[in-house]
Image: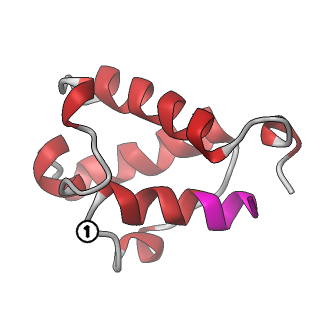
Amino acid sequence: MNETFVTMGLGDIIEDTRDFLSEEFEVDRDLILPENSLKETLDLDSLDYVDLVVLIEENLNIKVTGEDFKEIETFGDFYALIQKKLSL
């Protein structure tokens, strides 16, 4: 388990994730909702996914790959991935 987030719940991690995604991709934080499309909301292209992988590794200290994003459509899917990787 990732020691950094042992005392944090998924809600805290989601809030932190919303903060760094809105800052990095210059998107209104209020648009980063579980039901919204990750790709459309953040206006991601293939290079942006590389940036996203790096951001996740830097901010959450977990390893993800492009393969992890094949099934990700919404922010809810994205949060489920984070939860799975952090074993919360």
SS under mark 1: loop
Numbered disc total: 1
Q: Residue at left 37%, top 43%? A: 51
Front one among 14 and 62: 14
Q: Which corner quadrant of the image does residue 1 belong to? A: bottom right
Compared with residue 67, is residue 59 higher up or lower down, i.e. above or below? above
Q: Position of residue 26 (x, y in %)?
A: 20, 23
Q: Quadrant of the C terminus?
A: bottom right
Picture quadrant of residue 45:
bottom left
Instruction: Give the magenta part as a residue range.
Output: 83-88
* 83 relative position to 88: left or right: left
Asked where in the image residue 82 lies, by quadrant, the reply is: bottom right
Name the residue: 25% across, 68% down.
Answer: 73
What residue is disc 1 on?
Answer: 73
Q: Is residue 1 left or right of residue 26?
A: right
| Residue at (43, 26) in percent of width and height | 20
Give the percent coordinates (x, y) of residue 8: 75, 36
Q: Decide which of 70, 15 is in the foreground and name it.
A: 15
Horizontal and vertical percent for residue 17? 48, 35
Disc 1 marks a residue whose amino acid type is Glu
- Is 26 colored magenta in this rendering? no
Q: Residues within 10 Å of mark 1 (few under 14, many from 20)?
A: some
Q: Nearer the viewer, residue 11 or 28?
A: 11
Question: Was residue 86 drawn as part of the magenta stretch in this picture?
Answer: yes
Is residue 6 found left or right of 68 in the rendered image? right
Residue occupying image coordinates x 24% and y 54%: 38
Identify the main secondary structure in magenta. Answer: helix
Q: How is the image coloured?
A: secondary structure
